[in-house]
Image (cartoon, rainbow, N blue to C red):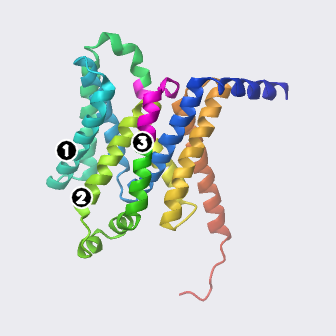
Amino acid sequence: MVALQAIFERVIDLFQLPFMQRALLGGIFTGAMGGALGSFTILRQLSFFSDALGHSALLGISLGVVFGINPSLVLLPFAVIFALVVTYLLERTRLWTDALLNIIYSASLALAILLLTFADRYRGGLNNLLFGDILAVQQQDLMLSGFLCGIVCLFVILTLRVQLLITVNETLAVARGVAVRLQRLLFITLLALVVAVSIKTVGVLLISAFVVIPACGARLWTQQFAYYVLLASAVGVGTAIAGILMSAAFNLPSGPSIVVCQLGFFLLSMLVSARTTAQAPVNSGET
C-alpha cells in the first residue's frame, strides 16, 4: 500500500512538470490521429503501407542530418513525396503489393542507416529515432500535431460517407461519380503527414502500432463504421494516456509503454469477442 502511494505521488509530481504535460498532449494528439486513420487503413489492407512510411521517415531524417538541414523541416515534405511515389508505383507495377512494399521498406531502412554512419554527431540519438522520445516533444511540435489532428478530424467528418464507400466497394464509388483517385491521394497524404509528425513521439519502429493496434482492437467491439472510427480514436487516446502514466510511474520508455497498453486492450478485446461469440445462441432453424 505504501509502495502504491509512493508511485501515485511520483506520478502526480511528474505531471506538474511542463515536459510531462507536453508529452501527455502529444500522446493524445498522436493516439487520436492514428486511431482515426487506422480504422480506414486496416480495412483497406494498408497496414504494411504505414510501416513502410515509418521507415521512409527515417530516411528523410537521415538526409536532413547529412546535409545539415533541420530534420523536422525535411521530414514532412519528404514523407508526402515518398508516399505519393509509392502509391504511383503500386498502381503502375505488376508486382504484388506486399512484395513491393517490402522492397521499399527494406531499402529505405538500409539507406537511412548508411547515411547515419556519415553523421557521427547524431549516433547518440538513434534510439530516439527508432523508439521515440515523447518527453522531448516541444511546444512547436504540439502546435503542429494539434493543427494536423484538427485537419484529420475535419477530413473524417466531411468525407466519412465517401471514405466508407471507397473502402467497401470502390467500383460502386466510381459508378456514383466519386473522385476515387483524388480521395485516395488525400488519404495517403494525410497518413504520411501523421506518420511524419508522430515519429518524434513514437519512433520509426513503433509508428505502425499506433495506426494498426487501436483500430484492430476497436473493430472487435462494433460493426457500425461511424462508431468504429470514434472508438478507434478513443482507444488511441486512452492507451496513449495509460502508457504515459505507466512510463512515469515505473520509469519506462514512453513509446514502448504505450504500445504495450495498446496490446493489452487488443488482447482484452479478443477475449471479450471470443466469449461473446461462444455465448451467442445458435439458431437451430438455419440450414
Of discs 1 and 3, which sits in the foreground?
3
- Which residue is painted at 40% across and 43% down in the image? 148
Rendered view: 119 above or below 264: above
Element at badge 3? helix
Q: Return the residue nearer the eye: 107 or 43.
A: 43
The amino acid type of the residue labelled 3 equals Phe
Q: How far apart are the alpha carbons under marks 1 and 2?
A: 15 Å
The amino acid type of the residue labelled 2 equals Leu
Q: Which residues are magenta?
A: 129-147
Q: How far apart are the alpha carbons under marks 3 and 2?
A: 22 Å
The amino acid type of the residue labelled 1 equals Val
Q: Position of residue 109 (x, y in %)?
A: 29, 30
- Can the viewer see residue 132? no
Q: Which residue is mark 1?
A: 85
Q: Which residue is mark 2?
A: 182
Q: Which residue is mark 3?
A: 147
